[in-house]
Amino acid sequence: MSQATSEATVTAVNGNIVAIEVPDGNIVKNEVAYVCPGDERLKSEVLRVYGREADLQVFEDTQGVRVGDRVELTHRLLSASLGPGLLGTVYDGLQNPLETLASRDGFFLRRGHYVDALLTQHKWSFVPQRRTGDRLRAGDVVGTVQERGVEHKVMVPFDVQGQVELTWIQGGSFTVQDPIARIRDERRARPLTMRQEWPVRIPLPTDLFRRQLVERKYPSDLLVTTIRIIDTFFPIARGGTACIPGPFGAGKTVLQTLIARHSAVDVVIVVACGERAGEVVDTINEFSQARDPRTGGSLMDRTIIVCNTSSMPVAAREASIYTGITLGEYYRQMGLDVLLLADSTSRWAQAMRETSGRLEEIPGEEAFPAYLDSAIKSVYERAGVVSTRDGITG
């Protein structure tokens, strides 16, 4: 999408739902916009478009937002930043590193403050695996860096169309923003860095499946959790999905932590979606202090935590699920086994119910949106086993 921005105007405010008017009508669903009350810029996402008007879901408290306030339209979809430096980080639902935010703003985070998801100043040792003149396609590996003991594969951006030629590549220590290679197609040359962006609501391998650059395989192996009752009576397939139902206090989060610690996987992604703040703090402390039984190091070295507690904005609760899934798909594309734990689906659905109510949509059973079934399906369908052109399976 275009990198240029345009402007709109607030016409109504209903909780975290803001209605806007776009003079030129140039707006698309799921693009990022910033509502600007005074000097603040509140991140939001376009949920619904009808003609020259649209409804935004604001990811912050909308107190002080008034009719007539300016809105910036970015013409970019809500996306996740992908690259070295993700492992060992605790993010919020919009992929802001919480530790960086806390060091800058203190314990009480101010609205409208956002931080780059990756370490922009840290240098990574890049080792090329391709030569000048090689013909490449989207998702092909061009080199590797070592990220906390995991071999992080740097790939051709997933939005590249057709075949491209590698015209230049270099090894050495670089930040995620430094050019490491250059590719050229029939029309133009394009520099490559170690980072890329991908829209969180679009499955990462969708276009790769269509162009037959990756293949989805039927799950055939078991995920070894080393928990006897699961492996014996409730086996989970590698590339499959499972759920842990139960009432409050049944021990679902405890079981989830045990699965994350002992399962035979390379990367663990924990999405704390709408959980109580105390439980999220316990999870972060436990993962930080726990030892990895496979390597003997810290369990956080191969873990990403995306937390959006019940005290954080409800609007970001839904986005946190998609952010975690996109990060998981990225590491799966490298041929790694990724375990994604979302706690909990019910609170994610409650966030959807609240948003649907504010949009005045026709409710379904128990006031949940009528499309809840398809929304949950679209999330679980993003799991699976994929194999790339290079024979890498994850």
Image: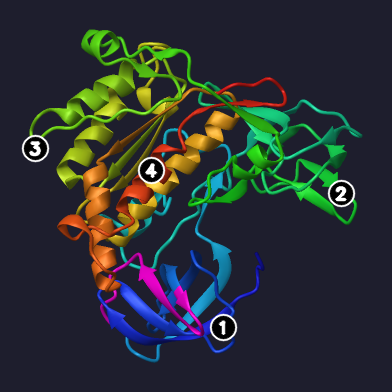
Please determine whether, in this image, residue 213 is positioned above or below residue 111: above
> Which badge, 4 or 1, is on the more N-terminal residue?
1
Q: What residue is shown at x 49% (from left), y 29% (from top)?
A: 384
Can residue 212 be spotted in the picture?
Answer: yes
Which of the 4 image quadrants contains residue 246? top left
Which of the 4 image quadrants contains residue 209? top right
Which is closer to the viewer, label 3 or label 1?
1
Marks counted in the figure total: 4
Residue found at the very far bottom of the displayed protein: 68
Q: Which residue is mark 2?
A: 185
Q: Secondary structure at mark 3?
A: loop
> Which badge, 1 or 2, is on the more N-terminal residue?
1
Please determine whether, in this image, residue 90 is positioned above or below residue 257: below
Q: Which residue is mark 3?
A: 248
Q: How far from the left and from the top, in percent, is residue 77?
A: 54, 61
Left or right placement of residue 98 versus residue 383 in this view: left
Q: Residues within 10 Å of mark 3 (few under 14, many from 20)?
A: few
Q: Which amino acid, mark 3?
A: Phe
Q: Which amino acid, mark 2?
A: Asp
Q: Which residue is mark 4?
A: 377
Q: Which residues are magenta?
A: 49-65
> Are the residues flagged by discs 4 and 2 in contact, CB closer than 8 Å?
no
Looking at the rendering, in which quadrant would you find the C terminus?
Answer: top right
Q: Secondary structure at mark 1?
A: loop
Would residue 59 be counted in the magenta stretch? yes
> Are the residues flagged by discs 4 and 3 in contact, CB closer than 8 Å?
no
Would residue 351 be counted in the magenta stretch? no
Q: Secondary structure at mark 4?
A: helix
Left or right placement of residue 149 versus residue 353 in this view: right
